[in-house]
Image (spheres, rainbow, N blue to C red):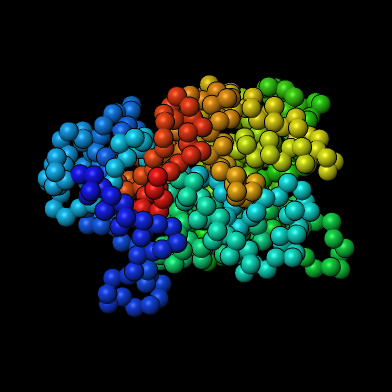
């Protein structure tokens, strides 16, 4: 068995990141020339298995049929003979993770592969003014590879921040086996109104790029949604608020006070038009909504996911439960940018750390659907986005709840629950592993040492 395992690992090392398997004979050079192909059958032996649906089980085996999971069974029944012969596997590879905990591939539903950290306006402006979209795309391919190596086998990338439709191309290159990376759903350019989103503060006679697509008025915004979908947007993203402040006189009856308030960007007419057009074409809408008006208007307009949600009133949490709206808090990035933004003249960001922790606690208690998103790219891609798990547990989720938010719940948010989010027969073989017990110490998820996507190994211990 040992010999077989070593041989398998050597063979698998050829499939490690950066060396995709050659395409099948007869394929033409083009979009799908290099799709990595998994072995016909694979057996993974796990010390512990957390399948995403039930509690942890010891000494389990996962049988794969190509890209998919065929069977999950106790290792004593996996048919692996004592001398290395494989019982019911016809022609298979064996991956020995008997000292590891196997988990479903992690999902981050809020990333920016085309952004490389933006604490201050200066950081952001530099990327849009001094780096070409082509150079940013090259960096984006690196970010995508890093996400996969961290154990995120699926991501929802929530806008390119001025890099056009480059996310559609990165997704295409990953699906075509040109570069390694996670499965992606992409939002392309995102939307805001005139005067609300960087680059701002330049002289009126100096044309500068925008970090979003600007639209004003219900008809123009509806048309713009059609345009983004035409060019490959899976999701529509809108910015529904800006300019945050602690409201000394929060709107009457709004609890808890003091409310973090904002300037709402879109009118309700504009928001409703965008949501209607996206839903009409069976696409979903994510809303960057940080404070009171942004969240309230978004939920009222029927938006599918609330991003950040630093302040959400008790009444809006109730409304989110009624409507099935997902909450995607981003606790780590808030802490990451706070000091720098306070120094740059916006001390409200320091208060927002406490406000967002309080909102998170109330949302957990209320039972809102919470998915795992990090805003990676808003912070440096050299920081593992899994650092977000620690804060989720610190502020009120149990480790199983935090893990569920990044697997089953995230898969549901993406509408991919039939394919990913748990280790079950029929699903895609997106599997990661860590040493130790992530349910006892959630920081174990920051040290994923085995990554498989669609039956192909991209990282191994
Ligand atoms: Zn973001």
Please tell me which residue is depicted at 26% across the width and 53% down the height of the picture: 7
Residue nearer the viewer, 60 or 13: 13
Please determine whether, in this image, residue 369 is positioned above or below residue 337.
Answer: above
Q: What residue occupies the far front of the structure in this picture?
A: 3
Left or right, residue 130 beside residue 218: right
Instruction: Place residue 138 in its image quadrant.
Output: bottom right
Residue 129 at least partly seen: yes
User: Could you tell me which residue is drawn at 80 percent across and 38 percent down?
Assistant: 342
Q: Pick the residue in front: 15 or 34.
A: 15
Quick one: quadrant of the N terminus? top left
Q: Looking at the figure, which quarter contains the C terminus?
A: top left
Res. 183 image quadrant: bottom left
406 w.r.t. 174: above or below: above
Query: 407 above or below 149?
Result: above
User: Residue at left 70%, top 65%?
Assistant: 131
Residue 42 in view here: no
Picture coordinates of residue 267, whole percent (x, y): 69, 47
Position of 460 with respect to 241 (left or right) is left
Residue at left 36%, top 36%? Answer: 100
Residue 343 image point, x, y percent: 83, 40
Where residue 384 appears, as percent x and y from the top left, is 56, 43
Q: Position of residue 132 (x, y in %)?
A: 68, 68
| Horizontal arrangement in the rendering, residue 56 relative to residue 280 (left or right) | left
Q: Nearer the viewer, residue 450 or 157?
A: 450
Q: Is residue 178 above or below residue 147?
A: below
């Amino acid at each position: 068995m040992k010999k077989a395992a070593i041989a398998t690992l050597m063979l698998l090392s050829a499939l490690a990141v950066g060396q995709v398997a050659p395409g099948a004979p007869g394929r033409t050079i083009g979009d799908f020339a290099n799709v990595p192909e998994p072995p016909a059958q694979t057996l993974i032996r796990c010390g512990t298995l957390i399948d995403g649906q039930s509690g942890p089980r010891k000494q389990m085996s996962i049988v794969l049929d190509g890209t998919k999971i065929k069977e999950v069974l106790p290792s004593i029944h996996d048919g692996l003979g004592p001398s290395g012969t494989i019982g019911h596997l016809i022609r298979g590879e064996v991956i020995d993770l008997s000292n590891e905990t196997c988990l479903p591939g992690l999902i981050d539903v809020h990333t920016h592969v085309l952004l490389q950290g933006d604490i201050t306006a200066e950081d952001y402006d530099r990327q849009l003014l001094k780096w070409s979209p082509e150079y940013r795309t090259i960096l984006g391919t690196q970010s995508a590879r890093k996400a996969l190596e961290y154990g995120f086998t699926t991501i929802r990338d929530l806008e390119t921040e001025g890099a056009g439709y480059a996310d559609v191309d990165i997704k295409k290159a990953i699906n075509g086996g040109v570069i390694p990376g996670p499965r992606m759903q992409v939002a392309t350019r995102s939307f805001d109104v005139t005067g609300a989103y960087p680059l701002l503060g330049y002289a009126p006679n100096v044309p500068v790029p925008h970090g979003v697509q600007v639209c004003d008025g219900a008809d123009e915004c509806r048309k713009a949604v059609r345009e983004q979908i035409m060019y490959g947007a899976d999701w529509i993203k809108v910015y529904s608020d800006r300019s945050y402040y602690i409201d000394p006189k929060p709107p009457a009856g709004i609890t808890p006070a003091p409310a973090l308030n904002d300037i709402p960007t879109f009118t309700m007419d504009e928001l409703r038009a965008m949501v209607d057009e996206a839903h009409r074409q069976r696409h979903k809408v994510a809303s960057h909504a940080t404070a009171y008006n942004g969240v309230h208007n978004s939920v009222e307009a029927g938006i599918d996911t609330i991003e950040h949600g630093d302040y959400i009133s008790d009444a809006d949490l109730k409304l989110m439960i009624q409507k099935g709206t997902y909450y995607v808090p981003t606790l780590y990035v808030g802490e990451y940018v706070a000091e720098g933004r306070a120094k740059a003249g916006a001390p409200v960001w320091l208060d927002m750390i406490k406000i967002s922790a309080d909102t998170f606690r109330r949302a957990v208690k209320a039972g809102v659907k919470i998915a795992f998103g990090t805003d990676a790219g808003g912070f440096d891609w050299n920081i593992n986005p899994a650092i977000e798990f620690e804060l989720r547990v610190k502020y009120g989720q149990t480790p199983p709840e935090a893990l569920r938010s990044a697997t089953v719940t995230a898969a549901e948010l993406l509408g991919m629950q039939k394919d990913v989010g748990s280790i079950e027969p029929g699903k895609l073989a997106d599997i990661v592993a860590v040493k130790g017990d992530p349910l006892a110490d959630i920081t174990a998820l920051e040290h994923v040492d085995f990554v498989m996507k669609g039956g192909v190994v991209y990282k191994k211990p």
